[in-house]
Image: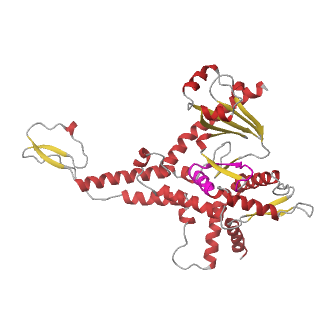
Amino acid sequence: MQQNIQNLQKMYRRALDARAPWINRWDAALKYTMPRDDAEAAMLFDATAADCADNLAAAMYSLLTPPESRWIDLIPESDAAPDAAPAVAALRANLNDSNFYTTIHQCYLDLVTIGTACLFMAENPIGAASAFSFNAIPMHDIALLKDKVFHTTSMPASDVMERYPAWTPPADIRDSIKRDPEMPLRLVQCLDGTQFTAWLDIGGDIENNIVSRGTFETSPYIIFRWSLSSGEQYGRGPVLRALPDIKTANKVVELVLKNATIAVSGIWQADDDGVINLANINLTPGAIIPKAVGSSGLTPLASGADFDVSQIILKDLRERIRHAMLADRLGLLSEKEMTATEILARNADMVRILGATYGRLLHEFIRPLVDRGLQILSRRGTIARIKLHSDAELKYLAPIVKMAASESTLIQE
């Protein structure tokens, strides 16, 4: 047991090292789509990527988990299997009464921005409006290593002592906790398959800092990715793929705005009886540049033609960003009337674009969500015990499935 615990801590460090290169990529993607402070917001000059990310997340919400329609069903595998209709009704009712539909949109934003999202599905106490409770966990708090999930969070020492009364603080921090009960402590929760271990990462022997152990029948951590390269643990979303164009477009707009400011405010000249020091000249809006009396002052070198390429470059960049983030294909229908064949062709194009992502989300998101929901409801006695693949087959009914059916119809025609 001691060896397994020490290995767990080593694997946690390996998971953090493997995640480290992704942190910078995620920060860059979030900086241009969802700035987290005033400093980042002040450096955002082009909102094309942010607008496309919002639209794509909303499209995924409507195509995969629309709250107003029935998007999942269960088909019994045999006549001897339990009746699946009450299970589907109970699952839908508990999802509708929970915070699922508000939380999953946050996960879709993470999915399209950084390529990986984590939905935590917990069980509410008996008597609550819903058996389920959901939380979108930031990927900065999650570290992955094969089939292991490490969730790191910070808790005040007083909360730790109240939540885990059996834990005895090490001698080196005991006095610090007494002086400052709000002292933050780093809590690490690890799910290795179905085995759960939580410990405080505060140095010293990990065995003495373990605060909880247990077993889950189904994982509460539902982690899903947009796309995945072989050998990688974390996904890549549309924003990460379009990041070079996003950065360039933001810089072009910044330079255009600076040039516009100079054009509006102007740069002025004033006679100077002394010697001009070129090192002191600052070409900023509203600047006054000294010049010798009677001279023409600082004179720009006139080019052969006044050819502004910034708008051409910016238009091309914005089109590439919208294309990479599917805004030109998942947007609203055009104002002109479209025939049924044109609508089918448009839907078929969308299915081809999202086909691989849809398949991955069905495997990594929808199935684990339904499986854990059925497990929680059956354990509470709300429904008969139903297991996917053995008792019932999951049938997905979301709008994207209907688009796939439309594509099949178009191909047959």
x and y percent of residue 11 in the render? Answer: 69, 32
Q: Is 383 placed left or right of 283 in the picture? A: right
Q: Image height check: is 302 above or below 280?
A: below
- The coloring applied to the image is secondary structure
Q: Is residue 17 visible?
A: no
Q: Nearer the viewer, residue 308 or 328?
A: 328
Q: Residue at x 75, y 59 (%)?
A: 91
Q: Residue at x 46, y 57 (%)?
A: 48
x and y percent of residue 317 in the render? Answer: 45, 57
The residue range painted magenta reads 102-129
Quadrant the C terminus occupies: bottom right
Q: Is residue 264 visible?
A: yes
Q: Residue at x 25, y 46 (%)?
A: 284
Q: Nearer the viewer, residue 347 or 73?
A: 73
Q: Is 362 placed left or right of 320 in the picture? A: right
Location of residue 101 (image quadrant): bottom right
User: Count the marks: how many?
Assistant: 0
Q: Image height check: is 400 above or below 157?
A: below
Q: Nearer the viewer, residue 18 or 204?
A: 204
x and y percent of residue 67 in the render? Answer: 65, 64
Q: Nearer the viewer, residue 52 or 67?
A: 67
Location of residue 351 (image quadrant): bottom right
